[in-house]
């Protein structure tokens, strides 16, 4: 018989995300994408891109070849973290085919001690869908969510120094290069040289308001379009 008191569980960290994102009906809509919670039925689609060497080798945690059962495990972990509000991991799907996952994006607390960023963002896309600006759209939607619904003041991202595509995505979303460091990435076999990128709340707010003022539709206008009209000013 287990006679441990019921309240003896280890203390859980404060959730990063609010109730709104912690239900699997939560969705983000961009001009061309739906971003929704990952599901078990996404396993083949997730394996189809995360299992590709050029995708995995640019990430810090995805091994190549993909270990057996890894997509199932990742989806389970993502749903658990989404439900507790510890992170927000969303599947990228074309708006016309919301059951067809083509990429993934996630935000969670920074694991790099001493980083100025409280939270970090990561993403990947099926190579067949690259070069269309889809990840820029997804990152903008996630930034809007983070700055609207969490207290984070600075969002960070890391890109391998040999990853100009990711660097470009971050620059187009308003991130600034904040230095380089060797990161321990066991999935890549050890220490890997990476660039750090940061975006603070103040800069994001300026980008959104410039986007609203710009005469032509642009990446910044897309950020502005993603800001909910009813959002209270203190929330962003
Ligand atoms: C990084 C990644 C998500 C970018 O996806 P994408 O859909 O091609 O991104 P976008 O189309 O939104 O933008 C890519 C930008 O990088 C540029 N780019 C792509 N490859 C490049 C290269 N080799 N050198 C310089 N720029 C490059 C593109 O020209 C584009 O910029 P532009 O719009 O100014 O022309 C995708 O390449 C990927 O999944 N990579 C593997 C996983 C990964 O790197 N994850 C990030 C870990 S930090």
Image (cartoon, rainbow, N blue to C red):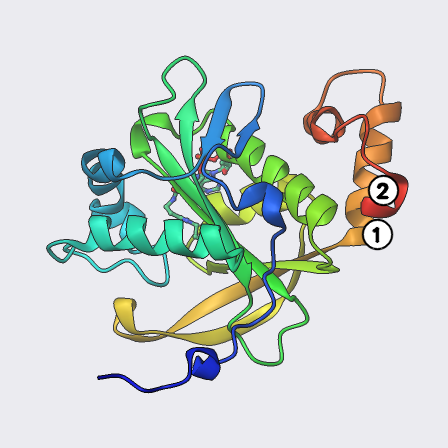
Q: Which of 99 and 137 is in front in this view?
A: 99
State the count of labels. 2
Residue under the image location 82 percent in, 43 percent down: 205
Q: Quadrant of residue 21?
A: top right
In the foreground, 84 or 52: 84
Identity of the residue drawn at 32% across and 23% down: 99
Marks 1,2: beta carbons within 8 A: yes
- Residue 182, label in figure: none
In the figure, 143 relative to 135: above or below?
below
Q: Name the residue under label 2.
A: 206
The image position of residue 65, as x and y in percent, is 14, 55
Residue 169, given in percent of the width and then of the height, sits at: 55, 41
To which residue does mark 1 refer?
A: 202
Tell me the quarter of the image containing the N terminus. bottom left
Q: In which quarter of the image is the C terminus?
A: top right
- Disc 2 crowd rating (10 Å Cα; few below 14, some 14-19, many 20+) is few
């Amino acid at each position: 018989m287990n006679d441990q008191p019921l309240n003896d569980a280890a203390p859980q960290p404060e959730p990063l995300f609010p109730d709104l994102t912690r239900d699997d009906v939560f969705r983000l809509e961009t001009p061309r994408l739906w971003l929704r919670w990952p599901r078990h039925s996404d396993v083949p689609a997730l394996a189809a891109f995360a299992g590709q060497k050029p995708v995995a080798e640019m990430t810090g945690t995805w091994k190549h070849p993909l270990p057996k059962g890894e997509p199932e495990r990742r989806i389970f972990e993502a749903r658990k973290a989404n439900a507790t509000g510890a992170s927000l991991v969303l599947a990228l799907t074309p708006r016309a085919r919301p059951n067809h996952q083509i990429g993934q994006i996630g935000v969670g607390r920074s694991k790099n001690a001493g980083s100025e960023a409280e939270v970090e963002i990561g993403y990947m896309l099926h190579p067949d869908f690259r070069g269309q600006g889809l990840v820029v759209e997804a990152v903008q939607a996630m930034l809007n969510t983070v700055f609207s619904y969490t207290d984070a003041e600075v969002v960070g991202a890391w890109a391998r120094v040999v990853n100009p595509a990711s660097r470009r995505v971050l620059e187009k979303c308003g991130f600034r290069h904040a230095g380089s460091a060797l990161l321990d990435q066991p999935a890549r076999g050890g220490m890997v040289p990476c660039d750090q990128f940061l975006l603070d709340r103040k800069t994001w707010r300026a980008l959104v308001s410039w986007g609203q003022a710009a005469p032509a539709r642009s990446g910044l206008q897309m950020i502005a379009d993603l800001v909910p009209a009813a959002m209270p000013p203190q929330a962003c």
